[in-house]
Image (spheres, rainbow, N blue to C red):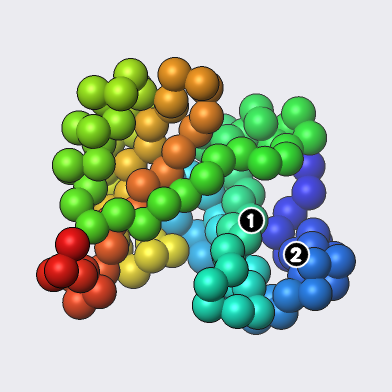
Amino acid sequence: MASISGSAPQFAKSLRLRWDGQVIHDPLQFVKVTFLPANLPTESTIELVEPVGPRSPIRKFAEAGGGLHHVCYEVDDLQEQIKHSQAAGANLVRVPLPAQAFGGRRIAWVVTPENLLVEYLERAAHAVRKDI
């Protein structure tokens, strides 16, 4: 099973991104993560995730070879987004928890009816738009 420190440099090189070498351990999620930010603010950031310990929810996925695991959306109101997703048929698979990689902002996980795993990230309080 590949580690972040062993694979991030090649990911960054092949995608022409810069990696700062920072790996964050999140004991509540049983993972280590790092980010490969895009070169432009309008482009997506890639998050590499490594399982930590036998209770990691991504251990089997990583042992099977890994790949694209999920998409993440930053949302203004986490509870409202969860309600909306459930009304559309999604199942909540992980209740909101603070995430070390995001400065304690809460994340929640749902699986859509199309079997897509989605992570919702609570927007930082100071970044909430009041005109929406």
> Taking 9 as reference, is 27 left or right?
left
Is disc 2 placed on a helix, strand or loop? helix
Residue in the image at 23% along x and 57% along y: 76
The residue most toward the left is 130
Crowding at mark 2 (Cα within 10 Å: few <14, some 14-19, many 20+)? many
> Taking 93 as reference, is 20 left or right?
right
* Residue 64: % across, % down: 76, 29
> Taking 107 as reference, is 45 left or right?
right
| Near-viewer residue (104 or 116) | 116
Crowding at mark 1 (Cα within 10 Å: few <14, some 14-19, many 20+)? many
Which image quarter: residue 39? bottom right
Residue that badge 1 annotates: 48
Q: Give how far apart the Cα atoms at labels 2 and 1 are.
A: 8 Å
Q: How many marks?
A: 2
Which image quarter: residue 32? bottom right
Residue in the image at 70% along x and 59% along y: 4
Residue that badge 2 annotates: 8
Image: 89 above or below 77 = above
Q: Are marks 2 and 1 in contact (CB under 8 Å)?
A: yes
Residue in the image at 60% along x and 51% along y: 49
Sequence order check, earlier mark of 2 and 1: 2
Q: Amino acid at mark 1?
A: Leu
Q: Amino acid at mark 2?
A: Ala
| Near-viewer residue (121 or 106) | 121
Residue 55 can be seen, yes or no: no
Which image quarter: residue 12? bottom right
> Taking 73 as reference, is 123 left or right?
left
